[in-house]
Amino acid sequence: MSDKELAQTERMNLLIDFYGTLLTEKQRRILGYYFEEDYSLSEIAELQQTSRSAVYDLLKRCEKILEDYESKLHLLRHYQVRIAQYEKLKALHIAEVDALVEVCMQTE
């Protein structure tokens, strides 16, 4: 898997974490097979008793849906900004700040 594909898979897993509950059960299941369990399109098609192209189309449709949610709600982007700020605070190495940052990170 190339760096670009790996980055896309990581992004999709994060989008699924944030917006997955807004998808149908079938959509979540197929995304899980593909992005979390690393099944091939053919393996998913066999499990779902459908065609490989139908699985591919559903994956692309779900990716678009998730990206649309992110473009409107920005939950992932805001999360990434918060995490970056937490890391900067932790780099200060101030015990009291570190403790507060840990509490904040645990609520994410």
Image (cartoon, rainbow, N blue to C red):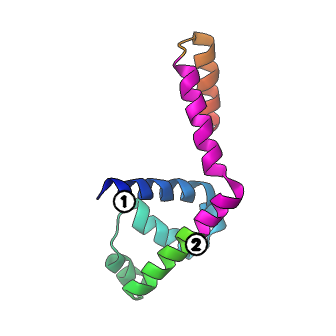
- Please tell me whether residue 48 belongs to the stretch shown in magenta: no
Q: Which residue is mark 2?
A: 25
Q: Are marks 1 and 2 in contact (CB under 8 Å)?
A: no
- Work out how far the residue at label 1 is from the one at label 2, CA to CA, in angstroms: 25 Å
Q: Earlier in the sequence, mark 1 or mark 2?
A: 1
From the viewer's perspective, tell me whether residue 96 is left or right of residue 37: right
**Start-end of magenta stretch:** 65-91
- Image position, residue 107 (x, y; %): 64, 36
State the SS at label 2: helix
For the point 54% across and 27% down, the residue is 87
Residue 86: x and y in percent read 59, 28
The stretch drawn in magenta includes residue 71:
yes
- Which quadrant, please, contains the N terminus? bottom left
Identify which amino acid the numbered label 1 is placed on: Glu
Q: Quadrant of residue 4?
A: bottom left
Q: Nearer the viewer, mark 1 or mark 2?
A: 1
Q: Residue drawn at (64%, 21%), measured in percent from left and top?
A: 100
Q: Report the label total.
A: 2
- Check disc 1: other Cα within 10 Å, few if <14, some if 14-19, many if 20+: few
Residue occupying image coordinates x 61% and y 70%: 65
Is residue 14 depicted above or below 34 in this figure? above
Residue located farthest toward the right when viewing the structure as drawn: 73
Q: Which mark is residue 5?
A: 1
Q: Nearer the viewer, residue 77 or 105?
A: 77
Q: Quadrant of the C terminus?
A: top right
Q: Residue at x 44, y 53 (%)?
A: 10
Task: Please determine whether, in this image, residue 72 is positioned above or below residue 76.
Answer: below
Packing grade of label 2 (10 A; few <14, some 14-19, many >=20) is few
